[in-house]
Amino acid sequence: MTRPAPSVPSAAPTPAPDPAQLMDRLAQAAAAYYRNFAAVAAGRGLTLMQGKMLSLLRRPMPMRTLADLLACDASNVTGIVDRLEARDLVRREADPTDRRVKLVLLTDAGRRTVEEIRAELLADLSGLESLDEPDRHALLRLLGRVFPADGTRPPR
């Protein structure tokens, strides 16, 4: 006669983290990311803000939009663009639809710099590569719910 396997007491379900815990973890992750980003940018002779601006320029952008995205004054953006332009990483040109607006664009050297920065950041963030495809989709979806790409506030 076989005896039934001993029952293993089930562990109590882990309570879901509260929003404050999630916010703290996001803050820790963002701080670690920007410390790493600042170090990688500095390795190329860039400040954190210069590196951030370069990484935002996936398409030509008005200087006002850059100021909004960087959460800084437009005069700060002018100085950042001046320094990046002096290094041939960006250039300004008039907006074809409104000549009063100046667009900022990456140069070829700027594009290469962004690619190098991203490659180094990805190498340092091996945790992202360790995620399988469903987890990557889930993380992107969840981040999109918390931080919508269009900049709108998520619904409450």
Image (tube, rainbow, N blue to C red):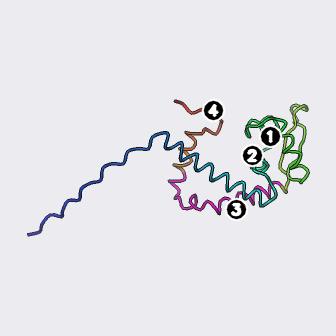
Magenta span: 110-136
- In space, the residues marked 3 and 2 are separated at their CA atoms by 17 Å
Q: Choose mark 3 or mark 4, whichever is in front.
A: 3
Q: In the image, what residue occupies the spot 78% across and 52% down?
A: 47
Residue that badge 3 annotates: 120
Going 14% across and 63% down the picture, which residue do you hit?
4
Disc 3 or 4, which lies upstream in sequence?
Answer: 3
Mark 1 lies on residue: 61
| Amino acid at circle 1 | Met
Q: First in sequence, mark 1 or 2: give its number.
A: 2
Dot in front, 1 or 3: 3
- Residue 44 pos. (x, y %): 80, 59
- Residue position for label 2: 56
Q: Earlier in the sequence, mark 4 or mark 2?
A: 2
Helix, strand, or loop for circle 4? loop
Q: Is residue 55 magenta?
A: no
In the depicted structure, whether residue 30 falls above or below residue 44 = above
User: Looking at the magenta stretch, what is its main secondary structure?
Assistant: helix
Q: Earlier in the sequence, mark 1 or mark 4?
A: 1
Q: Quadrant of the N terminus?
A: bottom left
Q: Do the numbered discs 1 and 2 sit on residues whose CB atoms are within 8 Å?
A: yes
In space, the residues marked 4 and 2 are separated at their CA atoms by 18 Å
- Number of residues whose C-alpha sits closer than 10 Å to that of mark 1, classed few (under 14), some (14–19) or many (20 or more): some
Q: Amino acid at mark 3?
A: Glu
Distance Cα–Cα, label 3 vs label 4: 30 Å
| Amino acid marked by disc 4 | Thr
Does 1 sit above or below residue 153? below
